[in-house]
Amino acid sequence: MRLFVFGIGYSAGACLSELKPHCEWIGGTTRSDEKASSLSAGGIEPFVFDGITPSAQIASAVDNATHILVSIAPGEQGDPVLGAFGNTLKRFDGEWIGYLSTVGVYGNHDGAWVNEETECRPVSKRSRWRFDAENAWLELARQTGVPTGIYRLSGIYGPGRNTFVNFQKGTARRLVKPDQVFNRIFVDDIAGAVAASIKTPATRIYNITDNEPAPPQDVVTLAAELLGVEPPAEIPFETADISPMARSFYGENKRVSNRRVREELGYTFKYPDYRMALQHLFENGWR
């Protein structure tokens, strides 16, 4: 496998760790020269991409890749990768393209279960941009015939990005909105599910999410218990001082099914619920 990654961040980095033993070459983009040096030291050929400007070096790397993973968020002008390298990708004849998206594309379903066949009705601008980007990648798949996986991720956490870190920073809060639930996904399970899908590449949408949508305050309470500290006081959502972005996030309530990943890909989640995941982080290092 010759893997090229657009946007090596937290989730894509976990995917690289999972896939690296199966790769003869890995290249990828970053926005900074400092990060490029770090990638190079880790055996990854780095390319600096500002999200706008195409380059012949990146186009050549894409031409030589067999697999492409995309982990760059779209904006008001559309998907930046397709915007800069659309013509290059139209001639891509590799084995697989993967696009990391979000369950936010489903919008609000008043706490009901959703799956990959559920109607998407994104609410926020970011989610609408994501949905448009998904469709653009699926259209490219129709044009090229390259199997393209769309991976809708729920709330991502893992080492360095979790509720324990929020306690350390003093930012942990227990916002309470009646009947509100969220799904989550441990970053290692993103990597595992993506790797499983590459074994049988298909143009398919997958929800990569845990088994148990749960109230957000329950996660904070368990983290406090594991740390041996008092949980923060509950704050009613209606009177909470939170950003408009956070408030809109709480406006979307749904339970996301991962059955397709489990049944079609045969993937067994390492951390199927937040309790197992927090226990693992607490015992093995959450920083």
Image (cartoon, rainbow, N blue to C red):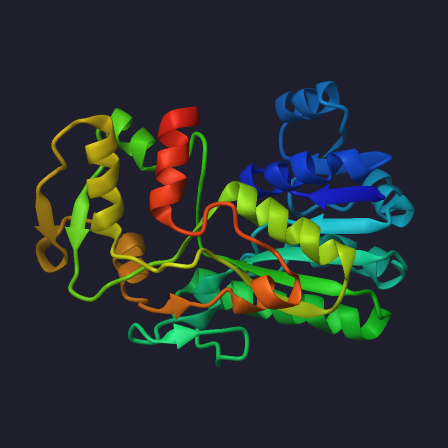
> Which one is nearer the viewer's eye here, 157 or 263?
263
Quarter holding the N terminus is: top right
Determine whether, in the image, residue 25 is placed left or right of residue 198: right
Question: How far across and down, in percent of the image, does residue 75 sit?
Answer: 54, 57
Residue at 45% x, 37% y is 158
Determine whether, in the image, residue 164 is placed left or right of residue 122: left
> Which one is nearer the viewer's eye here, 126 or 141?
141
Which of the 4 quarters of the picture holds residue 160?
top left
Residue at 63% x, 28% y is 32
Determine whether, in the image, residue 27 is placed left or right of residue 256: right
Question: How far across and down, in percent of the image, does residue 277 sit?
Answer: 40, 41
Which of the 4 quarters of the picture holds residue 253?
bottom left
Residue 50 is at least partly visible in this image:
yes
Residue 171 is at least partly visible in this image:
no
Question: How far across and down, in percent of the image, does residue 206 sit?
Answer: 59, 65
Residue at 38% x, 26% y is 283
> Which one is nearer the viewer's eye here, 261 or 55?
261
Determine whether, in the image, residue 230 is placed left or right of residue 199: left
Which of the 4 quarters of the picture holds residue 7?
top right
Quarter holding the C terminus is: top left
Query: Eyeballing the image, is 203 above or below 225?
Result: below
